[in-house]
Amino acid sequence: MSEPASISSGIAARYAKAVFELAKESNAIAALEGDVATLSTALSESDDLKALISSPVYSREELEAAITAIAKKAGLTDFVSSTLALMAQNRRLFALPQLVAALSALLAEERGEVTAEVVSAKALTKTQATKLAKTLSEKFGKDVNINATVDESLIGGLVVKVGSKMIDTSIASKLNSLQNAMKEVG
């Protein structure tokens, strides 16, 4: 992970833990899930929001006013709105995407779920995804959500990441291993 990305993740993790604890104390986990979904959608669909959170030209006051207005219009809970305003005051809005990801992970953990990042050479069929989720659920003892992406450079097979564990059965990695073994012999 690059240094700026790890800094953003660290900042986001601290805000996420605080927001999550506030929601838990207030019995507002369901409301927090709604807020996370709203923010995730807004970040993926609004180029203006992405520009706002990453632009250094706005003052702290302008950022706070803008993010507060966005939070109010989106109907976010008070503790999420307050956190976003605090992030704006501290010039930390650039970590908003990582905050959403960290909150999603905390909410999934609360539900007893884990997310598997699956990269395959071809798109997985519904049957394959269901079978893979079942197999991973048995291995990890939790419900598994699959986040599937396609990378044709794998040639075939899968790369599965669950937490800090990675299983690489791709043909590309096997070819690389074979190539390295051939270099050692010759």
Image (cartoon, grey):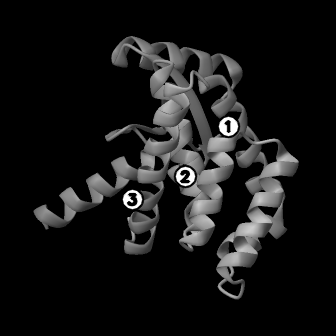
Q: Are marks 3 and 2 in contact (CB under 8 Å)?
A: no
Label 2 packing within 10 angstroms: few (<14), some (14-19), many (20+): many
In the picture as drawn, the residue positioned furthest to the left comes out as 185
Quadrant of image for the C terminus: bottom left
Q: Which residue is mark 2?
A: 99
Residue 115 percent location from the top left of the image: 50, 32
The residue depicted at 43 percent of the width and 20 percent of the height is 136
In the picture as drawn, the residue positioned furthest to the right comes out as 73
Q: Amino acid at mark 3?
A: Gly
Question: How many callouts does the rendering have?
Answer: 3
Label 1 packing within 10 angstroms: few (<14), some (14-19), many (20+): some
Label 3 packing within 10 angstroms: few (<14), some (14-19), many (20+): some
Quadrant of image for the N terminus: bottom left
Q: Amino acid at mark 1?
A: Ala
Depth check: give the residue in front, 139 or 156: 139
Instruction: Determine which quarter of the picture holds residue 160.
Output: top left
Give the number of the mark in front: 1 or 2. 2
Q: Amino acid at mark 2?
A: Leu
The tag earlier along the polypeptide, 3 or 1, is 3
Q: CA distance from mark 3 to mark 2?
A: 9 Å
The tag earlier along the polypeptide, 1 or 2, is 2
The residue depicted at 52 percent of the width and 42 percent of the height is 19
Disc number placed over residue 123 in the picture, else none: 1
Q: Are marks 1 and 2 in contact (CB under 8 Å)?
A: no
Residue 97 percent location from the top left of the image: 61, 57
Depth check: give the residue in front, 119 or 165: 165
Residue 163 as seen in the image, left or right of residue 8:
left
SS state under label 3: helix
Q: Which residue is mark 3?
A: 10
SS state under label 2: helix
